[in-house]
Amino acid sequence: FLAGCQDEGQLSMDSDEPVTVSYQVKVGDDLQSRAIGDGAEMKNLSVMVFDANDDTYVLCKNITWPLTDGNGLNLTLLRGNYKVLFWLQSETKPYTINITGDVSVSYGTDGWVGSISDMEKWDAFYAVDILTIDSEAKSKDVILTRPLGQLNWAAQDGFDTSEHQVVVTLSNVATTFHPFNEGANTQGLAENEITFTFNGFTEETLNTGEGAYTYLTCNYLFPATLTATFDLQKTDGTSIKTVEQQGAIAKNQRINVLSSIHLETENNPADELALTV
């Protein structure tokens, strides 16, 4: 809904005097520690307001991010109680907000194909504010955090990623996020498996106490408990190595599945598999 909505900057009625609330909006400081990406693809901030008494839609605004020169975001509302949703995403707008404030995502009928840098466009940040408007103007601070968890597969540094691709197959993927009722986020699971084919990698490495690892995949996902199968392939689709992992995806957290990749498997010991959060 928000991806194509008309901006509605204020609400006014003859029977009441509108009041302005000014928000200072920023992304949380833990950005770098929670993901591979730095959020640079985020360009579109959508703000959606609902009546807190009956959940009816009031207005929305679409704003270019970042806000210019630290200027605040102003909303003009009548006296009352409101719920405000802030949703920050890339210019491609992969997430859609409906008239109730629920956020949905679609990965297409044939799955997703791209590089790790392409996946950065599927990052997002959000916040919810409960607002009471009386007769005086207000000023409030809002901190945006990820509603998504990040699931990564990484190989010990030195693995040659050229002439390879990785297909990630996920089951029980959440395709809906409920910002105002996160207890309902077990609803809206995809009925079918979803595949992500990574055909381009990153030079960024993950450093652990056991050494450095090269990222092979990176998925941004709504919270859910899911099963992931990572299939390392030649570019012609020939499977080389498969790893399966189950786990719970939590918002603003990451799961790193770490593997030793041995292409000559006959005389090599079993791959070590570690799970870090």
Image: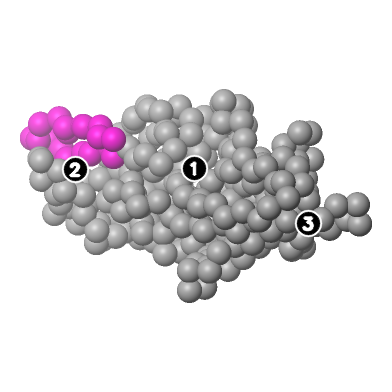
Which amino acid type is marked by label 2?
Answer: Ile
Q: Determine which residue is flagged by label 3.
A: 18
Q: Residue at x 52, y 29 (%)?
A: 172
Instruction: Select label 1 or label 2 by which is in front.
Output: 1
**What is the C-alpha distance between the residues marked 2 and 3?**
62 Å
Q: Determine which residue is flagged by label 2.
A: 261
The magenta stretch is: 256-277
Which amino acid type is marked by label 1?
Answer: Pro
Does residue 178 appear to the left or right of 14 in the view shown?
left
Q: Determine which residue is flagged by label 1.
A: 147
Does residue 213 appear to the left or right of 198 in the view shown?
left
| Front residue of 240 and 56 | 56
Q: Residue at x 78, y 51 (%)?
A: 78
Give the structural element (helix, strand or loop) at label 2: loop
Report the disc number at residue 38: none
**What is the C-alpha distance between the residues marked 1 and 3?**
32 Å
**What is the C-alpha distance between the residues marked 1 and 2?**
32 Å
Residue reaching furthest to the right: 14
Give the structural element (helix, strand or loop) at label 1: loop
